[in-house]
Amino acid sequence: MFGSVLRQFSRISLNQLPLQASGRSICTTTALQFKITDYLCAEPMKKKKKIDPAIVRAREERRRKKLEKQIRRLQKNARQLKPIDEMEVPLHLLDQIQKRSRGPPQISQEVQEERALLQKEWTRYKRQEYMAHVAQIDRIMAAQKRALDRLYEESEDLYNEAIMPDLQLIPYSVTGPVATPPIKGYESPDGDYLDVSKKWND
């Protein structure tokens, strides 16, 4: 209703309206609307309490002692290895260790003597095998030396060619050190992984 009255009133020209002698004029601008300012969540500032400097020093001292205790605890467990779950014995098995433990079996005297004789026989067999192997190597080296001596008597050039290593037999090439020398004073990390991949902002 108020809007319709304003629209009708806006159509009337100022020339058609009689001016009052009191000096009042008619405003043709839009009607003023009610506006509310933003509310502010504020409260009076609290008065600061004066604290005894001795209490402040005591708090700082307690905080410092707590930090020192944590640092000592970390230093004590600095080189402690991280546990491997696959190698940890379950707790229910540790509780049953008395039930699961078995003593050594009782072996009769005859079985002990039989095992001792079997051990001696196996030792003699391995010694004979080793001696036969060493004798075979000695025979091969002696035959090689005799062949080289006869070749030297025949031709010195052929002898020099025979004792030259055959580089084509086992091809071998080296490009650099196969292992990095150890760094003195370096402590390897205990299974830690540091992600150094680049992160791009969207």
Image (cartoon, rainbow, N blue to C red):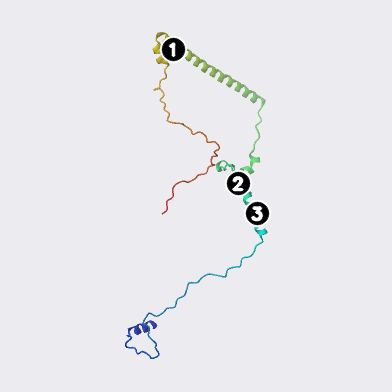
Sequence order check: which comes first, mark 3 or mark 2? 3
Residue that numbered label 2 is attached to: 74
Identify the residue at image location x=49%, y=16%. 137
Observer-side mark, 1 or 3, equals 3
Mark-to-mark CA distance, 2 and 1: 71 Å
Give the residue type at disc 2: Leu
Residue that numbered label 1 is attached to: 148
**Where is 178 relative to 134, above or below?**
below
Mark-to-mark CA distance, 3 and 2: 20 Å
**Where is 165 relative to 12, above or below?**
above
> What number is the disc on residue 61?
3
Give the residue type at disc 3: Glu
Query: Residue lying furthest bottom in this view?
Result: 21
| 108 and 103: which is toward the camera | 103
> What number is the disc on residue 85?
none
Identify the residue at image location x=54%, y=19%. 130
